[in-house]
Image: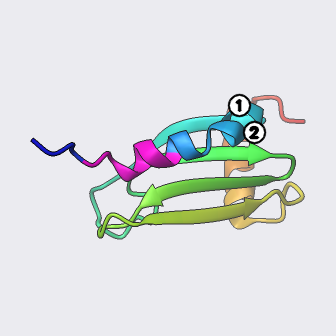
């Protein structure tokens, strides 16, 4: 019986082992599958080094998708401001 091909996310995680070990932030996350439009649908590999982060997921055709992020000054994004407001509303301390 021929050897079954492994999941691309498993192979990607192994290929990124060096980055995984040295990352300041690393994890496997699960994006919601409900709406079909989520670019982070299903399993994700997320890594951050210095002020940059990368999240890798699979598209519906089984190809790896790389999402890149760069840290910005707090309060410069709408989503960041909304998160901050929600935390402040509950009197949580923020730096």
Q: Which residue lies furthest to the front in this view?
A: 1
- Which of these two is toward me, 72 or 92? 72
- Which of these two is toward me, 67 or 34? 67
Q: Residue 13 in the image: x percent, y percent?
A: 52, 42
- Can you say whether 37 is above or below 20 in the image? below
**Residues at discs 1 and 2 in contact (Cβ within 8 Å):** no
Drawn side of residue 14 relative to residue 9, left or right: right
- The label shown at residue 92 is none
Mark 2, residues whose alpha carbon is within 10 Å: few (<14), some, or many (≥20)? Answer: few
- Which of these two is toward me, 20 or 81? 20
Residue 23 colored in magenta in the image: no
Which is the main secondary structure of the residues drawn in magenta?
A: helix
Mark 1, residues whose alpha carbon is within 10 Å: few (<14), some, or many (≥20)? Answer: few
Element marked by disc 2: helix
Residue under the point 90% across and 58% down = 73
The answer to whether residue 30 is seen in the rendering is: no
| Quadrant where the C terminus is found in the figure | top right
**Magenta segment:** 5-12
Q: Residue 85 in the image: x percent, y percent?
A: 72, 48
Q: How far is disc 1 from disc 2 in space, using C-alphas? A: 34 Å
Q: Quadrant of residue 71?
A: bottom right
Q: Earlier in the sequence, mark 1 or mark 2?
A: 1
Q: Mark 1 points at which residue?
A: 21
Residue under the point 71% across and 42% down = 19
Q: Residue 20 in the image: x percent, y percent?
A: 66, 36
Residue 9 colored in magenta in the image: yes
Q: Quadrant of residue 77?
A: bottom right
Q: Name the residue under label 2.
A: 88
């Amino acid at each position: 019986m021929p050897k079954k091909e492994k999941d691309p996310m498993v192979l990607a995680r192994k290929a990124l082992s060096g980055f995984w070990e040295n990352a300041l932030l690393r994890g496997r996350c699960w994006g919601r599958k409900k709406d079909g439009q989520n670019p982070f649908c299903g399993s994700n590999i997320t890594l951050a080094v210095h002020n940059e982060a990368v999240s890798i997921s699979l598209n519906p055709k089984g190809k790896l998708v790389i999402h890149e992020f760069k840290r910005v000054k707090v309060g410069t994004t709408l989503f960041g401001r909304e998160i901050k407001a929600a935390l402040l509303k509950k009197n949580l301390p923020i730096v």
